[in-house]
Amino acid sequence: MLLDVRNVVKRFPGSDQPVTVLDGVSMSVAAGETVALTGESGSGKSTLLHIIGGLEPCDEGAVIFEGTDLTGLDDAGRASVRRSNISVVFQQFNLIPSLTIEQNLTFQAQLAGVQASADDLAQSLGLQGQLRKYPEELSGGQQQRVAIGRALAAAPKLVLADEPTGNLDETTGSAVFELLVAQARDRATGLLIATHSERLAGLADRRLHLSHGRLTG
Ligand SMILES: Nc1ncnc2c1ncn2[C@@H]1O[C@H](COP(=O)(O)OP(=O)(O)OP(=O)(O)O)[C@@H](O)[C@H]1O
Ligand SMILES: [Mg+2]
């Protein structure tokens, strides 16, 4: 299994006692599989993605990536597994404003030691003719395509996407979501994608729903 999450518990400090946001969450993503994660606002989708991505610690449980428990590694060990295997796409596009689109597309791959062709990426993402521009010259939908390209360019085994279309209008958002799912399938990249849209969640191979700290299928 590519990713195995076992009995993850996450508590945040509350006004008088800790609030349990994830209450024994177990799930998996197989190599190349696309899994959609839905749940009401505040149900813990971002928290779960952050824990899987190693951006936040959990209180109990294990996050096993290709047989290695990431929760048992130190920061440097976790960063090393992540750098070459796991990419993240956020709701905010988080492009680097001072870099061109070409540089934004390729720098993460360079950090991971992967050769990436900006021309090929632009072609597959519908960004032809944009490579010499800067992020502020692109529309929101185009910027998110760059963020997706940047994530995929590093040839990760798993992409974690947290409401990647949340800042886009419905039509643009649907197209970007479909592009991400199609690109992940083409590259046999595992994809765990949080969304509020039941319709878009239906495009995934499998769906999970988070409610009251627990997952249901
Ligand atoms: N750093 C934090 N400190 C305290 N509470 C937090 C923290 N991060 C998240 N929470 C709480 O954990 C719960 C889950 O938040 P999370 O952001 O994971 O939800 P979500 O499902 O991603 O919501 P949304 O759909 O609005 O993005 C919320 O009640 C939130 O207030
Ligand atoms: Mg969220």
Image (tube, rainbow, N blue to C red):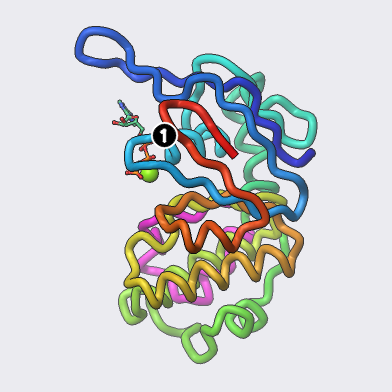
Q: Position of residue 71 (x, y in %)?
A: 62, 22
Of residues 104 and 123, the one drawn nearer to the viewer in this rendering: 123
Of residues 30 and 120, the one drawn nearer to the viewer in this rendering: 30
106 up-or-down from 40: above or below: below
The quarter holding residue 105 reads bottom right
User: Does residue 42 appear to the left or right of 47 in the view shown?
Assistant: left
Residue 9 visible in this rendered orientation of the protein: yes
* Magenta residue check for 49: no
Taking the spot 65% from the left edge, 50% from the top edge, the residue there is 206
Taking the spot 35% from the left edge, 20% from the top edge, the residue there is 12
User: Does residue 82 appear to the left or right of 20 in the view shown?
Assistant: right
157 up-or-down from 95: above or below: above
Of residues 99 and 36, the one drawn nearer to the viewer in this rendering: 36
Q: Which residues are magenta?
A: 87-110
The quarter holding residue 77 reads top right
Name the kind of residue labelled 1 in the image. Answer: Gly
Ligand 1 has an atom within 8 Å of the beta carbon of the residue at disc 1:
yes
Q: Quadrant of ligand 2?
A: top left
Quadrant that contains the N terminus: top right
Taking the spot 57% from the left edge, 72% from the top edge, the residue there is 179
* Magenta residue check for 107: yes
Quadrant that contains the C terminus: top right
Q: Position of residue 76 (x, y in %)?
A: 61, 30
Taking the spot 71% from the left edge, 65% from the top edge, the residue there is 185
Q: Position of residue 129 (x, y in %)?
A: 50, 91
Classify 10 Å Cα crowding around label 1: few (below 14), some (14-19), many (20 and above): many
At mark 1, the secondary structure is: loop
Residue highlighted by disc 1: 44
For the view shown, which residue lies furthest in the top direction? Answer: 16
